[in-house]
Image (cartoon, grey):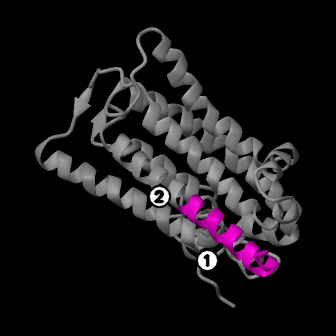
Amino acid sequence: MNMPYGWRRIIIAFAYGITCHIIFALAVATMIISMFFGMSKSLGNIALPACYLTNALLLLQFPLTHSLLLSQKGKIFLSWIAPRQHYKTLSTTTYAIVASLQLLLLFSLWTPSGIVWWRAEGPILSLFCCLYTLSWLLLIKSSIDAGAEVQSGALGWMSMAQNKKPTFPDMPTKGLFRIIRQPIYVSFVLTLWTVPVWTPDQFSLAVILTIYCLVAPRLKEQRFKKLYGERFLRYQEIVPYAIPKLYRPKNND
């Protein structure tokens, strides 16, 4: 007996959704734990000097591929890992799957150097734990403000399950986006630099990914200019890029 097409579509959608969210959760959990310990604990066990090359490849594959996936060539690649008739609908889900796999590879297969420069203790440890937690809460908040269904990959598979075209959230201007234009990237940078353990591994990670967070938003804003036009330009004039204004002029109207 052949399964009705509607049920087959729903089952495929849920399969992509479950896969996406499991990998996403594993990637985030691995990232939080690995950075908390300054990248000193991981499953990687490559001998010297080969570990330098493998670590470099793991570190560079995320920022390079992450941006490439947003290009036209990247969209073609994403179409290969989804059913042909649904690849456009599932684009946010497949993007989240690939991005999560990239992070999972980076943080789980990293080979630690075994060198610890500094480890917070006592009250300083408590302070850095609070700062690290706050940074992640800001990242979660900014992701929700930007559209949690897009950031998590849920939009694609949920739209497919309902047999409808994905409806993307409007240009984000509320929540943390009222304070700065790039709260996601700023929050992510904060998670990199508020860890309680510092090693050469963590420093390398923080430097490279911070550079990525300085470059990638520029490309994102170019896309927003094409997508939203004059509306984004007005938003760009009012809201600062990454550093909040200390005060806002009063509106006398």
* Extreme residue in the top direction: 49
Q: Position of residue 247 (x, y in %)?
A: 51, 70
Q: Is residue 211 above or below residue 181?
A: above
For disc 1, the marked residue is: 174
Q: Between residues 93 and 138, which one lies in front from this camera angle?
A: 93
- At a point 68% along the width and 61% down the height, the residue shown is 93
- At a point 43% along the width and 18% down the height, the residue shown is 46
Q: How many marks?
A: 2
Amino acid marked by disc 1? Lys
Mark 1 or mark 2: whose residue is earlier in sequence: 2
Q: Which mark is residue 25?
A: 2
Q: Between residues 5 and 102, which one lies in front from this camera angle?
A: 5
Q: Position of residue 182 (x, y in %)?
A: 61, 58
Q: Between residues 62 and 163, which one lies in front from this camera angle?
A: 163
Q: Is residue 120 above or below residue 223?
A: above
Q: Is residue 116 visible?
A: yes
Quarter occupied by residue 239: bottom right
* In magenta stretch: residue 52: no
Amino acid marked by disc 2? Ala
Q: Which residues are magenta?
A: 1-21
Q: Is residue 1 left or right of residue 213?
A: right
Q: Between residues 91 and 56, which one lies in front from this camera angle?
A: 91
